[in-house]
Image (tube, helix red, strand yellow):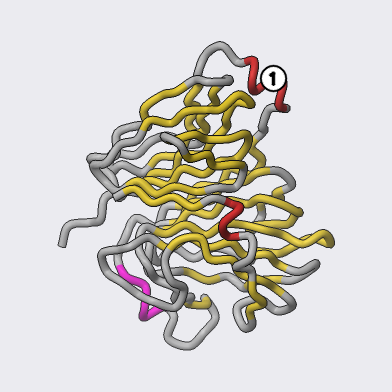
Amino acid sequence: MILSVSAAEVAKRRARIQGAIAGPSWRTNYLGTFGVTSTDGPPLAFRVDMGADTVTKPHFHEVDQFQVFLDGCGRLGRHEITKLGVHYADHHSAYGPVAAGNTGFSYLTLRPRQDSRIIYSDEPGSRQRVLPGKRRQYTVANVSLCIEPVRAARDQSSLEPLFEAQSDGLAAFVLRLGAGMSVPTPDTAESGGMYIFVANGCLVTGRDSFPTHSLMWVSAGDAIEVMADEIGLEALLLRFPMAAKE
């Protein structure tokens, strides 16, 4: 299964939210339905825009998760993020707080299946809800992107790991392509599926174009050819681990 959504499509979906963040905040749904839980898909992707100086308390989720920090500035735990940032957390691995700076803080939350539950680390009974797991976390605070002329003029593709790929399929890369270049995505067969996030430039598939901040989902075992248009492309490839066997 391959799903895609253009940043232009979701522009009108932003809505004010209450509860999870102490202060004004907004959510924009990309893929899936927020508030629905499923054990085997489809994926869930949404954007959160935190108001200036707002905070989300330390918490964990019952599903593996990537976050991509997009705009504004803030902190994730001890990590200060002022550019593009990436965070991964295994299920039941607590992280935070997430604190917006005075310009606000925007990020994407990416999960391989629909699960919107949040469990705060200080709430009664939270420890009893922690299940066995690796509880890995990786944070890449500030990923550099190229200006348009440099990006478009690139004469070789580049696939840069953000952290060491794991034996269960977990991996994260920055893919950089010059104008008109195309490459197949990394193998997803031994994984839990992969998101492709257009961080800079424009991605082309067939007759469709996906500008900056567009998103694609590639299920485990599926593949796609990624092509840049005339302004080049820089994309995040975020691959989930295989689900643990019972």
For disc 1, the marked residue is: 150
Q: Residue at x 49, y 52 (%)?
A: 5
Q: Residue furthest right?
A: 102
Looking at the rendered image, the quarter that the C terminus falls into is bottom left
Q: Residue at x 65, y 44 (%)?
A: 84
**Image position, residue 176 (x, y; %):** 54, 26
Horizontal side, residue 10 vs residue 127: left or right: right
Horizontal side, residue 108 vs residue 98: left or right: left
Observer-nearest of 182 and 110: 182
Q: Quadrant of residue 177?
A: top right
* Dominant secondary-structure state across the stretch colored magenta: helix
Q: Residue furthest left?
A: 246
Observer-nearest of 3 and 241: 3
Per the rendered image, the range of residues in magenta is 127-131
Horizontal side, residue 56 vs residue 93: left or right: right
Element class at badge 1: helix
**Image position, residue 229 (x, y; %):** 56, 27
**Image position, residue 44 (x, y; %):** 42, 63
Q: Residue furthest bottom?
A: 124
